[in-house]
Image: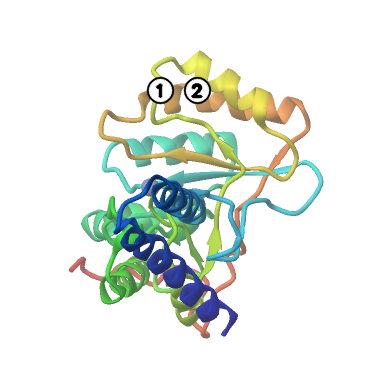
Amino acid sequence: MIDMARSAIFFLLFLVTNASLALLYPFTLSRFLLVASIYGIGTVVMLYLLFHPRNQWLVANRSRVDGAGCVALTFDDGPDPVDTPKLLDMLRDKGVKATFFVVGKRADQYPEIVRRTWAEGHLVANHTWSHHALFCFLMPGHLRAEIERGTESISRSCGFRSRFFRSPVGLRHPLLGPYLKEAGLEYVSWSVRTRDTLTANSSVLAQRILNKVASGDIILLHDHLPAGTDVMLEALPRVIDGLRERGFQFVLAGSREHVGGRPLEPAPCESAR
Ligand SMILES: [Zn+2]
């Protein structure tokens, strides 16, 4: 109910901001200044609500994990047919469990990688169906389909409904809160943005992460990028070793416990559809 009220307030803010343009006629300097103030403030507030990854107002979200000395590695945008298996090999060698926010349509392309991820003790979570670049402007039906099809895709490969969700680039949508509640999903954000998408030097990336991380952090990384994730794959062993030396422990960003009485372990391989 509160979620819906907040969605309504957001739409009202949108309307008022845009309707303020009508005050420009008949044009005077004082009217112009008034409209510029209303429009400017309204736009800044809306952008903050839609774009800030840890803002709680439109969607309740968690950006930290419990437990002293615990940190969580999270990998978005996979599975990738080349890089995700490399990453899984490394995590297995290091004995580290992580959380994977998979893109539904990619998971449908490579269901065996998603199954392997889950079978090796990691957490698999919903990162929407298509990773739509204009996520915050989707029509309601489209938004609901992005969430639901992401959940269905994980269900096809792993045999359970995901309990955790993260939107593309952390973008919000005025209706995301109520829709996630309806779908039984918890929004998991992050507290450390590594900028692995923009960094070309693995030493710089590793050092940046080591400098930033503190107890309870959820760390944002990517296991699929247009230019590949070699830099991240090279930096990660140093990050893991460095954090362990400082006494940190790696945990999942959420519980692997299932919902709805489905088996905890992945269902036997079904043919990919
Ligand atoms: Zn993403």
Mark 2: secondary structure:
helix
Question: Measured along the vertical axis of the image, is residue 222 above or below residue 64?
Answer: above
| Residue identifier under label 2 | 235
Q: Is mark 1 within 8 Å of ligand 1?
A: no
Horizontal placement of 224 versus 203: left or right? left
**Residue 103 image position (x, y, % from top left):** 32, 55
Pointer 2 with pointer 1, Cβ within 8 A: yes
Question: Distance between the Cα atoms at labels 2 and 1?
Answer: 6 Å
Amino acid beneath label 2: Ala
Residue, disc 1: 231
Instruction: Describe residue 46's horizontal placement relative to residue 96 as left or right.
Output: left
In the image, 157 versus 15, the foreground residue is: 15
Q: Which quarter of the figure is the N terminus placed in?
A: bottom right
* Residue 57 placement: quadrant: bottom right
Residue pictured at 36% horizontal, 56% vertical:
114
The residue under label 1 is which amino acid type? Val
At 55% from the left and 21% from the top, the residue drawn is 206
**Residue plotted at (43% across, 27% down):** 233
Depth check: 79 or 60 in front? 60
Question: In the visual, does 149 lie left or right of 197?
Answer: left
Rate crowding at label 1 as few (under 14), some (14 to 19) or many (20 or more) other CA atoms within 10 Å: many
The local secondary structure at tag 1 comes to: helix
